[in-house]
Image (tube, coloured by chain):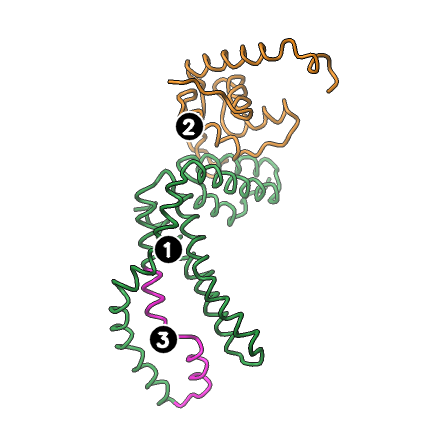
Chain colours: A orange, B green
């Protein structure tokens, strides 16, 4: 089967959930992306790529216990799978290879 | 600490976001809301989740969207061919009696008002709404993972189909603004389009979730 490339936001979500380990659910994932990108991220918008990543087998999900502070709703925790980790490494290699030798992107100022 | 998040926004999220993630998403929003976020923030998140989710799901499930719209366009024909003659039988059983009773009571104003509220269409409206609820129920049962998508598409295409009636009422108003009949037409059709139709579809869809 042909490998698929990550979409930009998909990759951000995947990296955020790798950083969060076992605490990756909607709120901290969106906060982690906000923190790193400096942009507002709607919580609902992270579930769309998470669904897509799960369908591709790159992420697995597990339902937590419902809690009163969440109005009796459970958290859905996400974890990266072995396949997801492999694909993330591959994406990193691809990006680094593309990054090298592009003079416009060297240095700090845009 | 904010105790209760905006009810309508939560209700919309429950009914118009797809698959099993909606509960977790609502939980996330409630957690943030109780942590000090404002109602405006909650509403913005809800609208983004519903709108964004709908666009993505509609794109992924193009054929399902086309199928639901097609089914919606076919429904009036199915109603006319298979149901309407039975509706007429029920209508004949109660409507003339009711009108006779009203005339006998000699309540002139009541009679005139009642006549303008299109009561003759009541049986058909009730049966049509029941049909919408039944189809919404069947759609949600058939596509539980795309519940929000099928309900949204079915609801908007159904409301869209009511628009020509409202246009007729508007044309009546343009032709003769002094005649109050246009107002009753708008009231009846607007009630049908914006209350009875959405309520039937949401009720049918909600019943499918709980059954």
The numbered mark at residue B73 is 1
Using the image as rendered, state which of residue B167 and residue B111 is in the foreground. B167
Characterize the magenta stretch by its predominant secondary structure. helix
Q: Mark 1: which secondary structure?
A: helix
Q: Mark 3: which secondary structure?
A: helix
Q: Mark 2: which secondary structure?
A: loop
The relative height of residue A88 versus residue B115 in the rendered view (above or below) is above
In this view, the mark in front (3 or 1): 1
The relative height of residue B59 versus residue A29 in the rendered view (above or below) is below
* Residue where numbered disc 3 is placed: B120
The numbered mark at residue B154 is none
Q: Chain of mark 3?
A: B
Residue A31 at x, y percent in the picture: 59, 27
Asked if residue B139 is among those painted magenta in the image, a careful observer would answer no
Q: Residue reaching furthest right?
A: A109
Q: Are marks 2 and 1 in contact (CB under 8 Å)?
A: no
Q: Are marks 3 and 2 in contact (CB under 8 Å)?
A: no
Magenta part of the chain: B106-130
Q: Chain of mark 1?
A: B
């Amino acid at each position: 089967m042909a490998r698929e490339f990550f979409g930009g936001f998909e990759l951000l979500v995947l990296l955020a959930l790798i950083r969060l380990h076992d605490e990756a659910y909607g709120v901290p994932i969106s906060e982690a992306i906000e923190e790193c990108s400096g942009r507002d991220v709607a919580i609902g918008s992270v579930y769309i790529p998470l669904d897509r990543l799960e369908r591709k087998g790159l992420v697995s999900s597990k339902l937590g216990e419902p809690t009163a502070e969440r109005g009796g709703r459970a958290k859905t925790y996400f974890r990266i799978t072995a396949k997801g980790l492999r694909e993330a490494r591959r994406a990193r290699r691809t990006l680094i290879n593309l990054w090298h030798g592009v003079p416009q992107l060297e240095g700090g100022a845009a | 600490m904010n105790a209760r998040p905006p009810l309508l926004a939560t209700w919309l999220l429950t009914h118009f976001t797809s698959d099993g993630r909606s509960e977790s998403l609502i939980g996330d929003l409630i957690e943030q809301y109780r942590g000090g976020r404002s109602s405006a923030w909650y509403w913005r998140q809800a609208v983004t989740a519903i709108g964004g989710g709908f666009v993505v799901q509609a794109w992924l499930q193009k054929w399902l969207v086309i199928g639901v719209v097609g089914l919606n366009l076919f429904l009036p024909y199915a109603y006319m061919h298979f149901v309407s003659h039975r509706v007429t039988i029920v209508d004949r059983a109660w409507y003339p009696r009711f009108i006779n009773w009203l005339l006998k009571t000699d309540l002139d104003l009541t009679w005139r008002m009642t006549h303008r509220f299109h009561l003759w269409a009541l049986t058909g409206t009730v049966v049509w709404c029941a049909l919408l609820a039944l189809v919404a129920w069947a759609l949600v049962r058939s596509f539980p993972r795309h519940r929000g998508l099928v309900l949204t598409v079915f609801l908007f295409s159904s409301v869209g189909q009511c628009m020509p009636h409202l246009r007729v009422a508007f044309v009546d108003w343009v032709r003769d603004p002094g005649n109050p009949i246009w107002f009753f037409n708008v009231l009846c059709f607007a009630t049908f389009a914006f209350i009875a139709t959405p309520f039937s579809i949401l009720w049918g869809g909600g019943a499918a979730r709980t059954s």
